[in-house]
Amino acid sequence: GAVGITCQKIGEAEVMANAGLEDIFLPYNILGRAKLERLKALHGRVTLSVTADSHETLEGLAATFNDAGHPLQVLVECDTGMGRCGVQTPADAVALAKVIDQAKGLAFGGLMTYPAAG
């Protein structure tokens, strides 16, 4: 069965954590020092996972979480026909998974996608 909750913004995740939820998924790329620092603070309080679909996103996450007490779970976002976001090929997904696996402070959490309409 499903566990936890999915939030679209760090602010929503902070509200949910303050309400006692302990397993939170943020399925979008988090960029920028201020947001990354808020994410790190939240990570210290709850079980947290995020997605990434670019090296740029992973660079920021790795730099922020390299000294975290426990690794941040990162899922590779894959485009499976919706044309929305995510890596475009299996090779791209493997490449990002390897970067996550080798980054101190990050842990590969799997793959994430949205089903294609139609």
Image (cartoon, grey):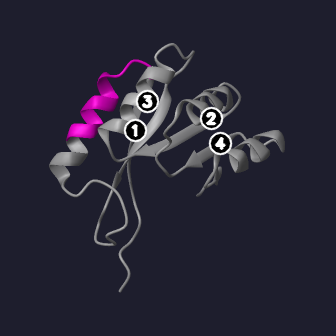
Give 60 or 21, whichever is nearer the viewer: 60
State which quadrant residue 80 falls in: bottom left
Label 1 vs 2, first from the N-terminus: 2
* Majority SS type along the magenta span: helix
Q: Nearer the viewer, mark 1 or mark 4?
A: 1
- The three-letter code of the residue at mark 4 reads Asp
- Which element is circle 1 on? helix
- The three-letter code of the residue at mark 1 reads Thr
How far apart, in angstroms, are the residues tagged by discs 1 and 2? 20 Å
Residue placed furthest toward the bottom: 118
Q: Is 111 left or right of 18, judged from the image as shown?
A: left
- Count neighbours of disc 1 (C-alpha within 10 A) and say few if under 14, some if 14 to 19, many if 20 or more: some
Residue occupying the point 46% across, 46% down: 29
Is residue 34 rendered magenta in the image? no
Q: Is 99 left or right of 77, judged from the image as shown?
A: left
Give 94 or 4, whichever is nearer the viewer: 94
State which quadrant residue 33 falls in: top right
In the rendered view, tell whether residue 44 sits above or below residue 111. above
Residue occupying the point 71% across, 28% down: 45
How far apart, in angstroms, are the residues tagged by discs 4 and 2? 5 Å
Badge number at residue 23: 4
